[in-house]
Amino acid sequence: MADALSSQFLRSVILKRDTIVDVREYPFCIPAVRNLKELELHPSVTFFVGDNGTGKSTLLEALAVASGFNAEGGSRNFNFATRASHSPLHEHLRIVKGVRRPRTGFFLRAESFYNVATEIENLGEDILEAYGGVPLHDMSHGESFWMLLTERFHGNGLYFLDEPEAALSPTRQLSALVRIHELVQQGSQFVVATHSPILMAYPNARIYLFRESAIEVVDYESTEHFQVTRDFLNRRDAMLRELFAEAAPQTTMEFD
């Protein structure tokens, strides 16, 4: 672990509180962001998990932008903006870097990947070859994500992934785990915001749970994602009865 820590690309992120003018403004009004001090990143894979609106994607975006990536996604060479919607949080972060520098990297945002695919086409065939040589718009959403993982991502890379499971089937998520492991073995580092209990099962990863009051390290089995999925699969019919009874007490439904 000592060797890994000394050679990782990003070691931690610190919120520069003295530069914040008004903590009541977005995104500092998000409790998890407001209470952020220093967050240590795992040398291989760090997960940001939590409920919607807790700030995990906001912090991931700020980390990516502070590390030199385009706010809408892409590599460090991308410099386009469809709509400037990112927060100013990156201006108030101090990134603590390791001794190595990544040879490559990418910021994947599920919500703006369409815009990235368009930019790749606009950049011409030479750039397109790095993504498999086929226009990403000619593929399904899931196929284009998979092409990115297998063709564009390489070893010694720094990768920020925001909800990559959005376009991937469960089987593809399992394949993505294998690909992430291959890249980790080749010296890459990942920071991933996700709701997927499949992806966050990656062994020995650091999982940060974003709560309203704080960000804390948790183990995989303690996440709501794991527990709810496990309970639903183990007692599906009973949970459906409970859910539908709460939603519409007057309605009855029979299960085989």
Image: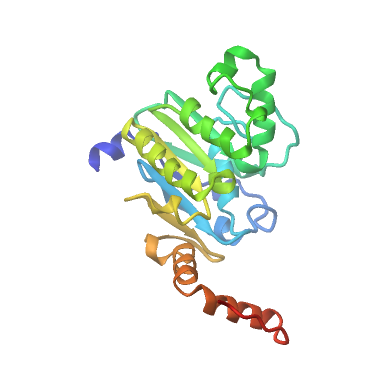
Q: Classify the position of the N terminus by image quarter.
A: top left
Residue at horizontal 48%, vertical 29%? 105
Residue at horizontal 45%, vertical 41%? 176
* Farthest residue, direction bottom: 250
Protein image colouring: rainbow
> On the picture, is 252 further left or further right than 220?
right
Residue 64 falls in image quadrant: top right
Residue at horizontal 59%, vertical 55%? 55
* Farthest residue, direction front: 256
How far across and how far down the image is residue 180, in percent? Answer: 40, 39
Residue at horizontal 58%, vertical 12%? 126
Give the vertical position of 174 relative to 119 (above or below): below
How far across and how far down the image is residue 140, in percent? Answer: 63, 36
How far across and how far down the image is residue 149, in percent? Answer: 49, 33
Give the vertical position of 250 relative to 118 (above or below): below
Closer-to-camera residue (245/63): 245
* Farthest residue, direction top: 126
Closer-to-camera residue (22/217): 217
The answer to whether residue 133 shows anywhere in this view is yes
The answer to whether residue 36 shows anywhere in this view is no
Q: Classify the position of the C terminus by image quarter.
A: bottom right
How many marks on residues?
0
How far across and how far down the image is residue 67, in percent? Answer: 52, 33
Give the vertical position of 25 relative to 139 (above or below): below
Closer-to-camera residue (153/46): 153
* Farthest residue, direction right: 83
